[in-house]
Amino acid sequence: MTTSELDKYKVDHLFLLIGENPLPNYVAANLLLNKGGIVYLVHTTDTLDEAKRLENILRSESALNSFKGIELRSLNDYESDAYYIQKEIREKLDGIKSGKIGLNYTGGTKAMSAHTYRTLFYQETKDKTYRQRTDIIFSYLDPRRLEMCIDREDNERIRIKIKPDTLPVKLVKIFELHGLELKTNPTQKVQLPQLAEELAKIFQDENKTKLWFDWYYQVFCEATRKKKGNAWGNWKSKTDLAGLSITVNTLPLEIVDVFREQNFLTSDDQFALSAIKSTGAFTEIEYFCKWLDGLWLEHYVLQKIANLANSQSIQDYGLNFEIPLTGTKDGFEFDVAFTRGYQLFAISCTTSRDRKLCKVKLFEAYLRAKQMGGDEARVALICCSDEPDSLKSEMADTLSSKKIAVFGREHLTKLAKEIEQWIIKNDQEAKK
């Protein structure tokens, strides 16, 4: 962790106002508290759970952060009550006899911030008058610029850039802060990268794209799936799938060549599904069927991100972020995600060009990413639309255009460069 610029603003007693998103509080605790310091998590009844989760996480990392103590300070239901807030904060202040004191007011309500700030700013003297404290460090996180802002006595601010290597935060940690447990561990393993690469290439050609979908729906699905009315239902049984050999006569030749290189084809050029397990990429044939159904695009995107990880300071990345949610049937899922420092980048993927579906996927990813990563989060949709710019413009009426990106069919073969430019553009926006 490189924090040399922040070292002189670190304190021994740090007050944090806990809001609905505890990620900024986690960042502030790690960046602003001295070793052996104490952090006070100031919360309301509504944010008690968030405070407790943050307390548990900070305690679990005690070997790394070397904090002396973590205390919860409850405002109960009085988050707007100036007298009560001043009473609770002053009570703790009176017990602090030595060490530097700080307040990071990124979280909490505006009323909590104002009254807590005022309580720490003015010190009560023996004759019951008040004087300005000169030893308090006030700070907040600027989500637009990714900076820690330190308030100065002359009403100016010292801005310190939080670079990606300052505080790397794992994706799983972000979910833990929100009390969410993943169904399965996210993976960084790319399945069948050569085939995914070739599929991306054929999607550049309208005729080859049609050949692919015609084969997939009229030949592959006809053989591998059950019918449910006029739609496709579940995949057939393991035994049935293992016994299938499927013609590839109508497939684009580029895909047939990859099938042959992967030893998927029999001596008479039939696609034998039993050969799938020999790749080691899938434990069940059904998983490959789902991969072919569209998951290949997620693996293609994952490969591009893996290639960019070192050059773009991407510390953590993966796919398969399935999260159960109470009250929903399937919960929600980030198809692919990565972090740079504590900033979350979430990517939603679909091989569809259906405008309505694309908009729904982008909108859901945007809401969930903001919930997880706060205002710093960024979201991209990677789809097969022929009008990605138009799609983004339409969504920008509802979502922040600076926080979203849309990549369409034309971008697939140069996706690594597009993602790189997306990251660079976000860095440039943060400097403004």
Image (tube, grey):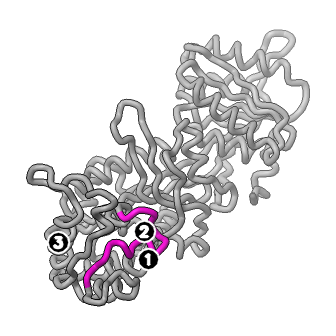
Neighbour tally class for label 2: few under 14, some 14-19, many 20 plus, Cα within 10 Å: many
**Residue linked to disc 1:** 193
Left or right side of 364 for 158: right
Task: Tell me what residue is drawn at x 30 percent, y 89 percent.
Answer: 267
* Amino acid beneath label 1: Pro
Q: Which mark is residue 299?
A: 2
Q: Is residue 185 above or below residue 177?
A: below
367 or 235: nearer the viewer: 235
Q: Is residue 381 visible?
A: no
Q: Who comes first in sequence, dot 1 or dot 2?
A: 1
Which mark is in front, 1 or 3?
3
Q: Who comes first in sequence, dot 2 or dot 3?
A: 3
Task: Tell me what residue is drawn at x 65 percent, y 49 percent.
Answer: 148
Neighbour tally class for label 3: few under 14, some 14-19, many 20 plus, Cα within 10 Å: some
Q: Which mark is residue 158?
A: none
Task: Tell me what residue is drawn at x 66 percent, y 45 percent.
Answer: 27
Asked if the residue at tag 2 contacts the one at tag 1, i.e. Cβ–Cβ closer than 8 Å, the answer is yes
Q: Which mark is residue 219?
A: 3
Q: Where residue 274 sits: x, y (%)?
A: 36, 72
261 or 46: nearer the viewer: 261
Left or right side of 106 for 426: left
* Amino acid beneath label 3: Val
